[in-house]
Image (cartoon, rainbow, N blue to C red):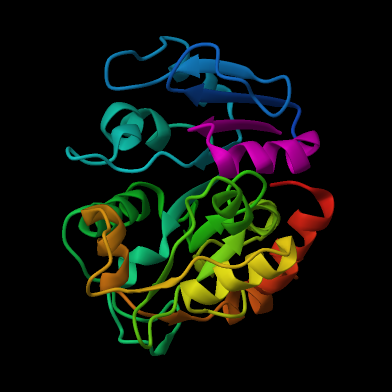
Amino acid sequence: MRLFVFGLGYSANRFIAQHGGQFTGIASTIRTAGKSAARDIETLVFNPDVTDPGIGDRLASADTLLVSVPPGADGDPVLLTFGSVIAASGIQRIVYLSSVGVYGDHQGAWIDETAPVSGEGRRRARIDAEERWRALAGDRTTILRIAGIYGPGRNALENLKAGKAHRIVKPGQVFNRIHVDDIAAAIAAAFEYPQTGIWNLCDDEPAPPQDVVTFAAALMGIAPPPEQDFATAEMSLMARSFYASNNRISNARLKRELGVKLAFPTYREGLTALWQRREI
C-alpha cells in the first residue's frame, strides 16, 4: 500500500514516524526543498509558486492519501491544483485533517459531530474545504476535526522555558486540545476503518488555558506567570480570535467507532510524559 501526503507538517511527520512502516512507499509534498522528514520518504515541492511535475504520477500510483494542507484565501490549494487527478485516481481512502474551529461558538456547551458549523474567514475556508472534499470523493474521504495540538517541542513547558507563556483568564473559557501521538493513532485508525465519516479528535477534558500553564509550571518547579485579564491583556489579533469560540467537544464517537484509546486523555498525562522524557 502506497501513501501520498500533502503537507509534511508536525502531525503528518509524527504519523509517518510511528505508522509509516505499514506502507510499501511514501511520498509527500513539502513547501521548501531540503525540509527534513520523519524517515526516508520521497519529497516533492508544492507551494503557491512551485509545483513539482512528479506529483501527478505519485498520486496516480497511491492507494491512500493524507491531506494536512490548510485552505488559503483562494480555497483549498490541493483541490484547486489536483482535484481532477484525485477524483480520477485509484486512491481508496483519503484522510483530510481539518479543525474543530469549524463549529464556531457554542458558549461552552458540550457538542459532538452533529453540531452545526459556522464562521467567517479562516473558519469559513475550512468549512468550504470539508464540503468540497466530501463532494469530490465522499465515499473515500474521512475528515478528522482536530483540536489544539501539542507535543514534543510544542507545549506549555516549552513556552515557559522560552519565557513566552501567559495565563490569560477569560471567565468560563475552555479550549480543547490533543497530543500529537494521539493524532497519529487516530489517522492510522481512520485509514483502517472500513467506513468514512467525520470524527472529532480531542482529549477528554476541555480546560481553561491558564490551568494548563499552571500545571506545567508545577512540573518544572517554577512559579507560573501572573494571571492577565483577557479584556486588557496585550494579544495579537490572531491570538485574541481563538477566544471567540468556547466549546466542550466530545470525542465519544472517535473512541466508540474508530476504537482509539487515547494515550494522553488529558493535558496532565501529556505534559507529565513530556516533562519526564524531556521532550520539551
The stretch drawn in magenta includes residue 242: no
Asked whether, in this view, residue 38 is left or right of residue 253, the answer is: right
Residue 190 image point, x, y percent: 62, 57
Can residue 82 be seen here? The reply is: yes
Residue 14 image point, x, y percent: 67, 41
Near-viewer residue (264 or 227): 227
For the point 76% across and 42% down, which residue is it?
19
Residue 13 image point, x, y percent: 63, 36
Asked whether, in this view, residue 105 is left or right of residue 29, the answer is: left
For the point 20% across and 66% down, which residue is it?
119
Can residue 202 be seen here? The reply is: no
The stretch of residues the image draws in magenta is 1-22
Q: Does 17 sit above or below residue 104? A: above
Asked whether, in this view, residue 232 is left or right of residue 160, the answer is: left
Quadrant containing the N terminus in the rendered view: top right
Near-viewer residue (108 or 233): 233
Near-viewer residue (228 or 25): 228
